[in-house]
Amino acid sequence: MSHDVTNKIAITGPGLKKQGVVVLQSLFIALFTLLELWIRSGVGVVTGIVICLALFGGIRFGRSGTRYVSVVTPPLAFAATILVHVILTDGLKISRAGIDFIAALASVAPYLMLSALYGWFMYFNEKAKSRPSRKSVN
């Protein structure tokens, strides 16, 4: 009784729609970002890894055609979460809020860059594969 077991997760349906990818990525990133802000009073490695995982999860569990949304959502969700947190904690003091916002973006910049490079590569790769070949058969 030997079974060929693969390490892939079996998805019974076609996957998440665009709206599902956006909601799940946004909630996942917001939860861990706010948790790290509450525990450490700043963002860093945990939030960066969560941003990468959210991107990979969106690419893996999204339907075909959701790759663009999977790539664009994590940086926007992170920026929105940080902006709301900074405004709620610092108020509308432009100089203080701006410094805190830029500092939070800078602390996860390497993770944002790596996930963006990987995500855009996957998006353009999928787009190139869906295009018909230029070679004509004569």
Image (spheres, grey):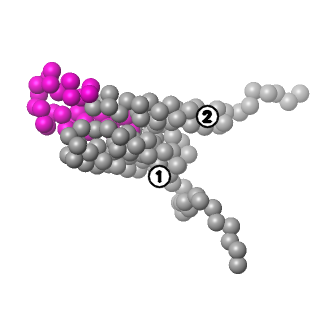
Residue identifier under label 2: 125
Left or right: where does residue 32 sit relative to residue 88?
Answer: right
Can residue 34 be seen in this snapshot? Answer: no
Q: Is mark 2 on a helix, strand or loop?
A: helix
Left or right: where does residue 24 sit relative to residue 115?
Answer: left
What range is drawn magenta here?
A: 74-103
**Number of numbered labels in the structure image:** 2
**Horizontal and vertical percent position of residue 15:** 51, 54
Residue identifier under label 1: 16
Can residue 15 be seen in this snapshot? Answer: yes
The quarter of the rendered structure image containing the C terminus is top right
Residue 9 is covered by the magenta coloring: no
Residue 88 is covered by the magenta coloring: yes
Main secondary structure found in the magenta portion: helix
Q: Residue flagged by tag 2: what amino acid is it?
A: Asn
Instruction: Give the residue drawn at x 47%, y 33%.
Output: 114
Instruction: Give the residue drawn at x 22%, y 47%.
Output: 39
The quarter of the rendered structure image containing the N terminus is bottom right
Left or right: where does residue 92 sit relative to residue 53?
Answer: left
Q: Please tell me which of labels 1 and 2 falls first in the chain.
A: 1
Instruction: Give the residue drawn at x 41%, y 31%.
Output: 110
Q: Quadrant of residue 76?
A: top left
Q: How far apart are marks 1 and 2 (CA)?
A: 20 Å
Q: Nearer the viewer, residue 27 or 49?
A: 49
Above or below: residue 15 compared with residue 51: below
**Horizontal and vertical percent position of residue 45:** 35, 40
What numbered label is drawn on residue 94?
Answer: none
Q: Residue flagged by tag 1: what amino acid is it?
A: Leu
**Horizontal and vertical percent position of residue 123:** 55, 35
